[in-house]
Amino acid sequence: SLAGCGTEISQATITYPTHSATGDWWQPAPGTTWQWELSGPIDTWRDVAMYDVALFDTPDAVMDRLHRDGRLVVCYFSAGSWEDWRPDRGAFPTVLKGEALAAWPGERWLDVRRLDLLGPVMEARLDRAVARGCDGVEPDNVDGYQNDTGFPLTAADQRRYNTWLAERAHERGLSVGLKNDLGQVPALVGLFDWALNEQCFEYD
């Protein structure tokens, strides 16, 4: 699987995927090159196999350019926090919103136990990813059980939610990456297609 803490890994050859719900989604080989850009102008000229960009913020023209150049496009969104600047911010019931994320103004943890309320919002985001032509998704903030969320989240709660996310992504033919949550890699490795470990040098 693809894993890393920087922005690029050694070169690999990939096959462009076809979206389907039969398991025909992108599963990167070790050594796949990638670029991770979530803000500012996207450097579309980089010679990498995959770009990881923001689902809500990346212009259509950039998505089209990356695909024309033969890049795969993974779309980032937060699956574990509410952000007050997103266009779907009103879709989250108040009961889902917990403590603020440290150093991230306007962002609050979500109660991932409440799939009855949270599930439809996240499925709408996954549908948006399909509509935008994303080849995969990077759901962020899927390790709330290790943080002060304001909810009594357990490791089992998180594992259940992350499993649900992976299954819903695959139902749509989307590749899905596990963001951080290193403690649950052994339990989730068979469900996710790749992993992205953030700030691994900083935290050893």
Image (cartoon, rainbow, N blue to C red):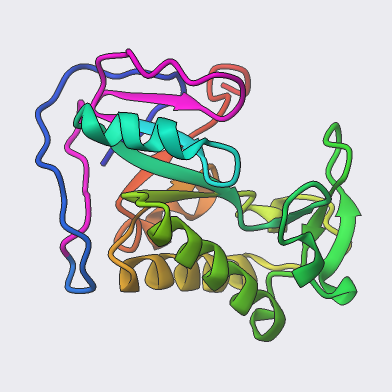
Q: Nearer the viewer, residue 65 or 140?
A: 65
Q: Which quadrant, please, contains the C terminus? A: top right
Residue depicted at 32% across the width and 59% down the height: 174
Most frequent secondary structure within the magenta stretch: loop
Q: Quadrant of the N terminus?
A: top left
Q: Position of residue 122 (x, y in %)?
A: 58, 68
From the top left corner, tell me how far across and down residue 51 is, in percent. 37, 31
Up-down: is 114 above or below 111?
A: below
* Residues shaded magenta: 24-50
Q: Against 64, is 187 above or below?
A: below
Residue 27 drawn above or below residue 38: below
Determine the residue located farthest toward the bottom in the rendered image.
Answer: 116
Kindly identify the residue that appears in the image at 19 percent across and 31 percent down: 70
Query: 167 and 146: which one is in front?
Result: 167
Determine the residue positioned at 39% across, 60% down: 130
Asked if residue 37 lies in the magenta stretch, the reply is yes
Query: In which quarter of the view is residue 52 placed?
Result: top left
x then y, percent, for residue 95: 88, 76
Q: Position of residue 101 (x, y in %)?
A: 83, 44
Q: Is residue 9 magenta?
A: no
